[in-house]
Amino acid sequence: MANDNFIDVTMLGALDVQRDLKRLEHNIQKKLVRSSLSKAMLPVRNLARSLAPVDKGDLKASIVRKNKTNKRGIYRSSIVTGTREELGITQNNKGYYPAAIEYGYKAQNGKHIPAKSFMRKALTDLRSSVIQNTANNIRTGIKRLK
């Protein structure tokens, strides 16, 4: 029986996954897709951590995976750096050093400091494997349910 209330994963490019996923109950679809995407994002977090510059190590340690669903029900798994508070950046300090490192900045002496894009590089380098691994994780989950 086809399920009219289904999770759309067509962006994965795996028609078999979409077809098989539609056959499952909606709550099982949600759990399967969420866990599959979350698991597929772990290598991105790990690569971002390995590429992050180290001074005291606070930035590297603060890089985590955050999973959340927005008001429209869209689930996201993101890799983020710590908050200002978590990184010990005081209220008096206008800058947010993870962004300065990621995008580059102009130093007080006027010299341009180039970007050292550790977050974007991690996602760019692993984008296709995240998509493929998400699809494979869903396939594996569906097989386990049969």
Image (tube, rainbow, N blue to C red):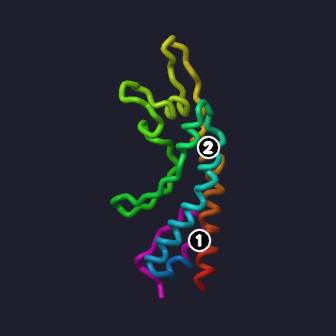
Q: Can residue 7 be seen in this view?
A: yes
Task: Please say if 137 is above or below 107.
Answer: below
Disc 1 marks a residue whose amino acid type is: Ile
Magenta-tinted stretch: 1-19
**The stretch drawn in magenta includes residue 2:** yes
Q: What is the total number of numbered labels drawn onto the structure image?
A: 2
Q: Which residue lies furthest to the top in this view?
A: 109
> Which quarter of the figure is the C terminus placed in?
bottom right
Q: Mark 2 points at which residue?
A: 49
- Marks 1 and 2 in Cβ contact (< 8 Å): no
Q: What element carries label 1?
A: helix
Question: Horizontal and vertical percent for residue 36?
Answer: 57, 66
Q: Residue 138 — which label?
A: 1
Question: Horizontal and vertical percent for residue 16?
Answer: 61, 75
Question: Neighbour class for label 2 at 10 Å: few (<14), some, many (≥20)?
Answer: many
Question: Horizontal and vertical percent for residue 137?
Answer: 62, 68
Disc 2 marks a residue whose amino acid type is: Arg
Could you say which is closer to the camera, residue 23 or residue 98?
98
